[in-house]
Image (cartoon, grey):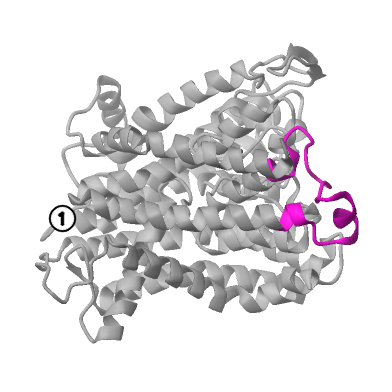
Amino acid sequence: MSTTAAGVLFVLSLVVALVAVHRPFGDHMYRVVSSTRSARVERGIYRLVGVDPAVEQTWGVYARSLLAFSAVSILFLYAFQRLQDHLWLSLGLDPVASHGAWNTAVSFVTNTNWQWYSGESTMGHLVQMAGLAVQNFVSAAVGVAVAVALVRGFARSRTGELGNFWVDLTRITLRILLPFAVLGAVVLMLGGVVQNLSGGTDVTLLTGGGQTITGGPVASQEVIKELGTNGGGFYNVNSAHPFENPTAWTNWLEVFLLLVIPFSLPRVFGRMVGQNRQGYAIAAVMAILALASIALTNVFELTGGGTVPQAVGAALEGKEVRFDVSNSATFAAATTLTSTGAVNSFHDSYTALGGMMPMVNMMLGEVAPGGVGAGLYGLLILAVITVFVAGLMVGRTPEYLGKKIGSREIKFASAYFLITPALVLAGSAAAFATGNNSTALNVGPHAMSEVLYAFTSASNNNGSAFAGITVSTPWWNTALGLCMLLGRFLPIIFALALAGSLARQQPTPASEGTLPTHRPLFVGMVVGVTVILVALTFLPALALGPLAEGL
């Protein structure tokens, strides 16, 4: 079978699997976030933190609860790293430097999982398990909670209540992410992914492919890092390491795990607003953008835009031969279409245009399907912008799901959209203005790509690295940490504010002039608005980097 044929089969099998689980898994998540009953362990958690699960919150209280939880998480994780040498299972490793601990604490709490360090030589087992891996769950749960709160804003009327953050966080973690992670971890271990606490000794194991391999210890975090679309890994080479991603079928499984939750959340949206077809429309937008990105990334890599790649027939540098060019390109597209950050190849080694595609995926706002929860609420805000544009075109007050999109709502949506481009472009400009671009290993357009990718990944809470640039300095750790922090929580505040504004409205009955938001026309409009907004915002920067290099 040719590489191209194998790549097509890989993608088609993913599509079939995602379609098959979209409805049942989406229905399960809907039941979790809509349930009024609390399990015994959940009631124990509520008593422990002093929360009444029957009391709902306004958007302001919901936001303050979320920010307080995240602030405490950052402080806890920072202290964990700084005191590492005094902790059990530290493996004799030194404390993490202050600027590095700040960056990592912010990174994992914001669901970015950017890693400036090599996990196997920097973090002990306890920090990995009780610190980083815990945030892999709860930071993803925060994203789903915000998405659910925004959907409640569309579904409810004449109320200021959007649910209870602590209830949403607890249920999403315990009923969705944790059980799914356990199941996925067992399957990955059957495929050869290591789960051990062997200290500093080497371990030998038999992989799913029948090969015996020897290497160092892997912490508990390793078998769950892909679940919940979190990419923080124990090894510096991430999913290119045979301990973490041993075979072609574990590679397929990891890509599936990246996509399954965000692609199933539109079903939750449709169920909550009482119109399943609205959920299918959002899922269609996600699918169109995702398939276009995967196809273009594969084309750019398989055609090989360079002397050596053209001579050998493909761009093989920086890729694992276990996964070939096509499956590596698909993984790269999937990890940047979501807020995962896991990689199984080095994007810095891609062709100029092939390396541009992961950047473009993140610049889209990671909405196809995006991060866990973050993709859904980002795309819903783009849908709000789309109906506003459509309303201006026909001279009618825009509506979405019966809610008027007035000046207040569009200001929240616009502020949401403008935050990350401002952080990306300002951060990249600051790096060049202060001379910190000198840490890039290349010059010219490729250096621009390396700097631009770093700030795009941090500001959009993706966490994947382009490689080819040293970011372990105090300046880079501080700058990228600020981008991760602001790029996560400012959009969340505006999304919740929008939800609160929508929830207080009385629904407007549909009329002859109402734009149907479940039909192919609207799907195409949302796709077009998403692409056009990104093109207008980032095209000049891309022209200085990957486009210039590609030409």
Left or right, residue 262 beside residue 520: right
Q: Is 3 included in the stretch rendered in magenta? A: no
Left or right, residue 442 beside residue 418: right
Up-down relation of residue 173 to residue 393 (above or below): above
Q: Residue at x 80, y 70 (%)?
A: 549
Q: Is residue 17 visible?
A: yes
Q: Is 313 included in the stretch rendered in magenta? A: yes
What percent of the width, then of the height, locates residue 417?
Answer: 45, 69
Q: Which residues are magenta?
A: 300-327
Name which quarter of the figure residue 121 lies in. Answer: top right
Q: Quadrant of the C terminus?
A: bottom right
Left or right, residue 9 beside residue 200: left
Residue identifier under label 1: 156
Left or right, residue 393 beside residue 303: left
Q: Residue at x 67, y 75 (%)?
A: 541
Q: Quadrant of the N terminus?
A: top right
337 and 65: which one is in front?
A: 337
What percent of the width, then of the height, locates residue 219?
Answer: 65, 24
